[in-house]
Amino acid sequence: ARKLALASERTPVVKETPKSVILLWLEGGPSQLETFDPHPGSKIGGDTQAIATTIPGTDVAANLPRTAEQLHRATLIRSVVGKEGDHARAVYTIKAGYRPDPTLVHPSIGSILCQADDRGADIPRHVSILPGNSPARGGYLGAKYDAFKTGDPVRPVPDVIAKVSDDRFTRRLADLRQIVEPEFARGRLAEIDRQRTLHQTSTSAAEVMMSSEQLSAFDVSAEPKAVREAFGDSAFGRGVLAASRLIEVGVRCVEVTLGGWDSHVNNAGLQASACEKLDPAIAALLERLDERDQLDSTLVVVAGEFGRTPQINAALGRDHWVHGFSVLMAGCGIRRGHVHGATSSEEPGEKPEEAVVQPVTIGDLHATILERLGVDPAQEIETPISRPLARSEGKVITSLLDV
């Protein structure tokens, strides 16, 4: 059938393996003290206990037992510092590498990657699974670089399966073109011609996607039961497993969101509950990618918008904290078994930023991620307001690189 042949008629993808990124987004702000940077027995440590990891001398919270067994594959950054303590502004800054600017919207990392290198797949190259409140976007690069949003992989990808016969589907497409194309062609200007081109491009891309065998990458039920169980019986775990399958078919960026970290009350309970979903997913992902020799071409980033305060408030919660929180990175030449930076076990003073050892700015983190993905962070892009702007305002952190 014509519809089934569309994807196979495309030019074959270049065989060289392009770099990809999987972002495990911890929405709400995970507590570094209950995850990657515990300080048990101190005034700020709370009730969280620490366990040893496969990096000698390095502990993580007991909430992450399986991740502890895989830490030798990763770099743990404990000293990220930001300037935005508001959720929306902090999310924007981490994902885009710039603080919010009223004059333009900056693109997220996945959008930058896809725009810099157009090799990819029949299906969208930028995917957001369980997108939450802050899906990645193309910003000034354009809406075509926005992430394709989908939900729990236990359910089929929405709106891609034709519910009519191939013949009827083909007739509907023909009718659509017959109705829409003349509207664009009736004495309109260049802008209308541009819109017509976008309409044609979008329709063609949707046809290819609907006919592509690569759609099966979303279907985690195809994996053995033991593999699915390893990632955890949760929507997030299934999303991370789907992410690992998607990069195998050419998707360049997959963002999987896990909420439940905004712990202004009952911090210990909320953080432990979220870690139950996060822990198996991180561990299984790192192990799978490494065993399949995909970790050299896939960058894994585990991050949220900020950390939580060293102080425990009256509601037994922790509030927003930008003065030293944690990010985990692995793959694409990031050092293995490395810990960068440190935070103090003492209660913060008037200048808490001064207690952070080897601080890492959001800009520098962003630049390092882009560089590892083969994208020049210093290259300038012409924005819609005719202002040349570098992809990142930061500098690459060379001490994180395996050189």
Image (cartoon, rainbow, N blue to C red):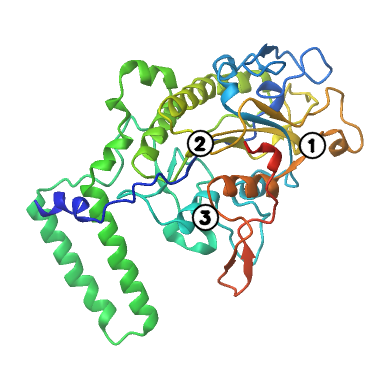
Q: Left or right? Give the position of 347 relative to 91.
A: right
Residue that carries the numbered disc 2 in the rendered image: 257
Three-letter code for the amino acid on which mark 2 is drawn: Thr
Q: Which mark is residue 358?
A: 1
Identify the image quadrant of the C terminus. Answer: top right
Q: Position of residue 38 (x, y in %)?
A: 73, 20
Callouts 3 and 1 close, C-beta under 8 Å: no
The quarter of the displayed image where residue 350 is located: top right
Viewer-closest of 71 and 181: 71
Binning the other alpha carbons within 10 Å of mark 3 as few (below 14), some (14 to 19) or many (20 upward) gives many
**Which callout, 3 or 2, points at the residue further toward the start of the chain?**
3
Vertical placement of residue 187 versus 164, above or below: below
Using the numbered discs, state the Cα–Cα distance from disc 1 to disc 2 in whole angstroms: 28 Å
Q: Position of residue 79 (x, y in %)?
A: 75, 34
Q: Is residue 320 visible?
A: no
Q: Which mark is residue 128?
A: none
Q: Which mark is residue 112?
A: 3
Q: What secondary structure is found at the residue carrying circle 1?
A: loop
